[in-house]
Image (tube, rainbow, N blue to C red):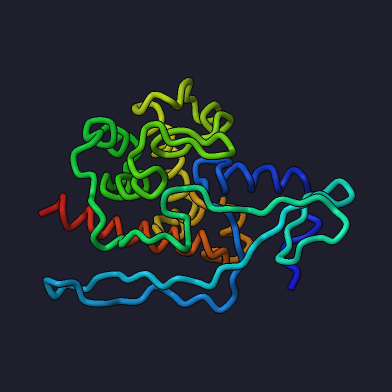
């Protein structure tokens, strides 16, 4: 099964700036047909809780062919290629973290997250969930592609958002929240689509008219949803 081939260089550059360590989101893109949607379970207190459904994994091979970037689930026989790998905190399909019980970061960067959420009219618990998913609240987080900090901003993305130094937590949060707000506006406040776009790029969401069939993107959206629900329950009591 061939996946995405003969993609224009400009399109791929924009796409890669938003996935696999190349943009505000840093997860790789893997298409996995037949992926189940998020299931509902009951939490210990009897409230509905989101559970994670892991998709099957498929290796994705990236290579250049005739001046264009191509992607396939079959390695090319006569061309150099690299294997895409997930790199954001919540992008690893095979993560052993229990997202229903993992420690939440309830007090870190309260002022920075609160101020940016107010400025860009976002739910601060959603911001906190995305920070958690992107970096695990590790200020020093840096992807192989060069995405930096709490919300994993690429230098080019930072510049486009008016961020002079994404290594500074307040600026990193400012840029990440601004971008997330743009995705929320673009996808009519649909949190699942907005977070999918944060991870895989808005073009991918538009192409598939929904969450792209990339394993890492779908697991990322699930985990953000779980974290968002948990942060809301913990901080809005």
For the point 50% across and 46% down, the residue is 25
Quarter placement of the C terminus = bottom left
For residue 114, above or below residue 192: above
Number of labelled discs? 0
Residue drawn where x is 70% and y is 66% of the image: 73
Image quarter for residue 32? bottom right
Q: State the residue lying farthest toward the top.
A: 164
Give how far across and how far down residue 33 sits, in percent.
59, 75
Q: Is residue 174 visible?
A: no
| Residue 175 picture location, percent across and down | 43, 33
Q: Is residue 125 visible?
A: yes
Q: Is residue 203 left or right of residue 44?
A: right
**Quadrant in which residue 105 is drawn:** top left
- Residue 149 coordinates in the image, percent (x, y): 42, 33
- Percent x, y for residue 200? 55, 53
Left or right of 28? Residue 173 is: left
- Residue at 78 percent across and 60 percent down: it is 5
Of residue 33 and residue 208, the one placed in the foreground of this image is 33
The residue that appears at 50% across and 30% down in the rendered structure is 161
Quadrant containing the N terminus in the rendered view: bottom right
């Amino acid at each position: 099964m061939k996946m995405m081939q003969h993609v224009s260089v400009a399109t791929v550059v924009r796409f890669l700036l938003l996935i696999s360590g190349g943009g505000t989101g840093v997860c790789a893109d893997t298409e996995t047909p037949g992926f189940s949607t998020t299931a509902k379970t009951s939490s210990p207190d009897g409230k509905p809780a989101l559970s994670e459904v892991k998709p099957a994994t498929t290796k994705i091979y990236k290579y250049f062919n005739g001046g264009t970037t191509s992607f396939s689930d079959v390695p090319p026989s006569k061309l150099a290629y690299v294997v895409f790998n997930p790199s954001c905190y919540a992008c690893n399909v095979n993560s052993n973290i229990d997202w229903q019980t993992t420690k939440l970061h309830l007090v870190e960067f309260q002022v920075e997250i609160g101020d940016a959420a107010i400025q860009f009219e976002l739910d601060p618990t959603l911001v906190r969930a995305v920070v958690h998913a992107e970096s695990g609240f590790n200020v020093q987080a840096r992807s192989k592609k060069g995405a930096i900090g709490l919300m994993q901003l690429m230098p080019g993305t930072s510049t486009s958002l008016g961020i002079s130094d994404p290594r500074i937590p307040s600026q990193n949060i400012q840029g990440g929240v601004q971008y997330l707000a743009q995705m929320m506006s673009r996808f009519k406040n649909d949190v699942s689509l907005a977070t999918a776009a944060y991870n895989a790029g808005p073009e991918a969401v538009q192409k598939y008219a929904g969450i792209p069939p990339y394993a890492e993107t779908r697991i990322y959206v699930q985990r953000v949803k779980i974290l968002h629900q948990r942060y809301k329950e913990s901080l809005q009591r």
